[in-house]
């Protein structure tokens, strides 16, 4: 609203109690208070109560259009048009349960019967973008289950049917990312269709970077509440696809002109897709990928597979180039700690020029959890790796100095014990280096 004349007096009941702006689409909540629709919907997505009365208001509570007040506001705008007040247009009716129910019916026809309108996915995506209420209604109607089955169908038939199915997969994955998969449905979905994991693996090996991110998040949602044997038996191809996604993340951080990455990072011509925050999608994808790898690395056979697939090197590169999030670093160090439990994992860690350096840098830098995992890696390397190689590199990259800092600062006793153990184990070697303060080191170890 553009108020040109400062002396225009606006009736108080024209103003939304939340935004304090003239209401464009006044609606009355069940608490009896009238708000602008956009303001109250955004409020309820964060706080499920009436801002004025504090009465509990669920997100899907009825909001009744106040047509009388809207007409009064429009009439007042018309009367003050000569003073620079623009008229408020009549708001478009929001999508209601009937709209969504109709599109869900069309979706099931399109998915199950291969009939119906092909624009159904786009329409559902628009509805999902318009508010949490719509997304909740879609989940309650089982849209997520239909979409997952559709993705499975499309990916397994794509080689036979050609590329025209790919667009439907893209739309389905975006919509699934928007509405999510309820935790209490994941086990049933996995049991009812044993081809889901195969289908998602195929997508992870395709070129579309953003689709890989959607897929990793979906995979984590589906398996996060599943029984451990499902995660334990993730195939090498799926793990390879997840590591490949992390590799794409590293590449994108260095070279956004890379064809396989940049093509999907550019804004789409679709106004709906452009609303999706790609950086947030990638961030969620990285977190989901690391959580999957952390869980799968609990089993020794998976650790061997991950090391053979180059996971150690890729995780180090990811931490060097991408990480800035505390949780990302904690997860990543947790995976490396487990992979260093096997000889090949330790070998890969030492073979990478930045392995010990980046782990050392993260000590006393991120969190207590990260400190414990970083020192666990350093401890394992110092105990079971070739002595001269480890000793030389830990001196060169400042590990000894950082471990001394751990003993000097206020931190947990277990952390200090780990640092003291590493320093004491190679004390005779450390003191041969002229850059090491031997008196200080001796004092710290004896304290």
Image (spheres, rainbow, N blue to C red):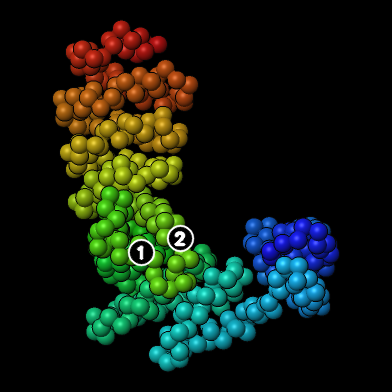
Left or right: 126 in relation to 445: right
**Is residue 189 something that shows in the picture?**
no
Q: Nearer the viewer, residue 174 or 143?
A: 174
Give the quarter of the figure containing the C terminus: top left
Judged from the image, the secondary structure of the residue bearing numbered disc 2 is loop
Give the residue number, with chain letter if any, for mark 2: 277
At 40% from the left edge and 78% from the top edge, which residue is drawn?
Answer: 149
- Residue 263 position within the rendered picture, expressed as x and y whole percent measured from the top left: 30, 65
* Left or right side of 437 for 150: right
Please state the horizontal and vertical placement of residue 415, each as a whole percent of the image. Answer: 41, 26
Q: Quadrant of residue 56?
A: bottom right
Residue 317 visible (yes or no): yes
For the point 31% across and 83% down, the residue is 164
At label 1, counting other C-alpha atoms closer than 10 Å, the crowd grade (few under 14, some 14-19, many 20 or more) is: few
Q: Which residue is mark 1?
A: 266
Q: Position of residue 61 (x, y in %)?
A: 71, 70
In the depicted view, which residue is nearer to us: 152 or 52?
52
The quadrant of the rendering that contains the N terminus is bottom right
């Amino acid at each position: 609203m553009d108020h040109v004349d400062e002396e225009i007096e606006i009736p108080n009941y024209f103003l939304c109690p939340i935004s304090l702006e003239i209401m464009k689409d006044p609606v009355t909540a069940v608490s009896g208070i009238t708000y602008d629709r956009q303001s109250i919907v955004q409020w309820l997505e964060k706080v499920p109560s009436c801002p004025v009365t504090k009465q509990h208001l669920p997100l899907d509570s009825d909001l009744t259009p106040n047509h009388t007040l809207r007409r009064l506001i429009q009439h007042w705008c018309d009367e003050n048009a000569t003073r620079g007040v623009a008229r408020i247009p009549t708001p478009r009716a929001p999508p209601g349960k009937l709209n969504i129910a109709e599109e869900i019916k069309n979706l099931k026809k399109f998915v199950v019967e291969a009939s119906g309108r092909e624009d159904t996915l786009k329409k559902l995506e628009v509805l999902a973008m318009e508010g949490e209420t719509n997304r909740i209604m879609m989940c309650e109607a089982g849209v997520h289950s239909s979409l997952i089955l559709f993705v499975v169908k499309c990916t397994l038939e794509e080689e036979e049917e050609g590329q025209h199915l790919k667009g439907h997969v893209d739309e389905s994955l975006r919509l699934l990312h928007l509405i999510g998969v309820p935790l209490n449905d994941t086990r049933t979905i996995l049991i009812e269709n044993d081809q889901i994991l195969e289908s998602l693996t195929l997508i992870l090996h395709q070129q579309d970077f953003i689709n890989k991110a959607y897929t990793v998040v979906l995979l984590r949602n589906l398996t996060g509440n599943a029984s451990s044997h499902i995660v334990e038996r993730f195939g090498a191809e799926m793990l390879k696809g997840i590591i490949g996604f992390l590799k794409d993340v590293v590449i994108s951080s260095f070279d956004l002109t890379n064809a396989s990455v940049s093509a999907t990072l550019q804004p789409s011509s679709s106004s709906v897709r452009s609303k999706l925050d790609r950086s947030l999608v990638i961030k969620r994808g990285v977190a989901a990928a690391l959580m999957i790898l952390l869980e799968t690395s609990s089993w020794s056979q998976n650790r061997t597979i991950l090391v053979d697939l180059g996971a150690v090197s890729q995780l180090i590169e990811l931490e060097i180039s991408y990480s800035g999030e505390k949780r990302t670093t904690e997860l990543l160090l947790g995976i490396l700690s487990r992979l260093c439990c096997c000889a090949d994992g330790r070998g890969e860690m030492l073979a990478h020029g930045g392995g010990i350096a980046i782990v050392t840098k993260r000590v006393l830098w991120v969190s207590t959890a990260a400190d414990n995992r970083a020192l666990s890696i350093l401890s394992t390397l110092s105990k079971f790796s070739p002595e001269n190689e480890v000793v030389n590199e830990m001196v060169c990259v400042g590990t000894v100095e950082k471990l001394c800092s751990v003993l000097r600062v206020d931190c947990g006793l277990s952390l200090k014990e780990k640092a003291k153990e590493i320093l004491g184990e190679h004390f005779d070697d450390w003191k041969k280096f002229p850059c090491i303060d031997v008196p200080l080191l001796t004092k710290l170890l004896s304290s």
